[in-house]
Amino acid sequence: MHHVVLDRWSRGGSALHRRDARAKTIAVLVFLIALGTAQRAFLPLSLFYLGILAAAILAAGLPIVAALKRAAVVLPFTAVFAAISLAAGEPMRAAALVGKSYLSALAVLVLVSTTPLPELLGGLERMGVPRYLLMVAQFLYRYLFVISEEAQHMRAALQAKSGTLKRTLWDRAKFGAAGRALGVLFARSYAHAEGIHQAMLARGFQGHFLTLSGRAFGRADAFFVAAALVIVVGARAAVEAWI
């Protein structure tokens, strides 16, 4: 599962993993703004930004090929709008749509792959993001793990009965059974999640997730933000001035 892999990646011990979540969030926001508002010389700038993200992935000790592949999940959605721009006779606009969406997804992937979700949400809360939205995101993320666990149990049961998911989906006579199994999956996941919620209430949950590994915003984090500003904004200014 995609979210399980990202959660495992976020538990690393590199220097990028040790930076405060607010510092990394600010750096990514600066990157996204500089990338989104870039108009002139987008091709050389995108190549430079891709190099920056690749260097960050290597510095964090993440598998670069796997990270590049996972960021490509946004391309099927962007390809629709790129095709419309291409049909309208705007190939540069189409290329910019694809490039900006991919680089944006890769930047966010680097953020969530180097920051455990509790720390990331805690940093966003300290930056003033409404707590209700963060709590919804936290519950949604945890619910994904519940669905993943139930799906693995049902898959093991299917294999124990000498069946495979691929054979079931392509067999028209069994396709209805697969659809009903999907309904059972969500029903069981909902029941499991409800039980988890009741257990949280029994343990005194009051609508706020507490973490034991909070980090203070230190001098190294301030230096990290300053370096990100200089590199990202300076690169754009230099490329646009050169063109």
Image (cartoon, rainbow, N blue to C red):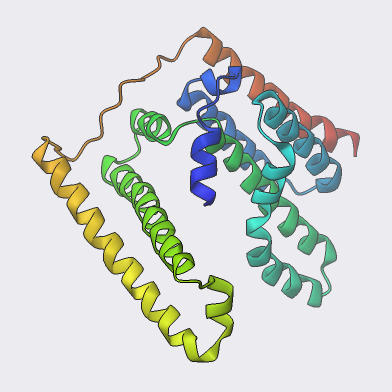
Q: Which quadrant, please, contains the C terminus?
A: top right
In x, y percent, where is residue 25?
51, 32
Numbered circles on residues, count:
0
> In this view of the protein, can residue 200 be seen by the observer?
yes
Which residue is outermost to the top?
219
In x, y percent, where is residue 10?
52, 32
> In this view of the protein, can residue 37 be seen by the observer?
no
- Relative to 223, is 64 on the left or the right? right
- Tell me what residue is drawn at x 71 percent, y 45 percent: 68
In x, y percent, where is residue 143?
34, 52
Q: Is residue 58 above or below residue 142?
A: above
Q: Name the one closer to the observer, 24 or 141.
A: 141
- Relative to 196, is 8 on the left or the right? right
Which residue is outermost to the right?
243
- Relative to 120, is 183 on the left or the right? left
In x, y percent, where is residue 196?
21, 48
Quadrant of the rendered structure where residue 15 is? top right
Q: Is residue 59 above or below residue 162?
A: above
Q: Name the one closer to the observer, 229 or 50.
A: 50
Quadrant of the rendered structure where residue 171 is? bottom right
- Tell me what residue is drawn at x 73 percent, y 75 percent: 84
Q: Name the one closer to the observer, 191 or 65.
A: 191
Q: Name the one closer to the observer, 111 or 172.
A: 172
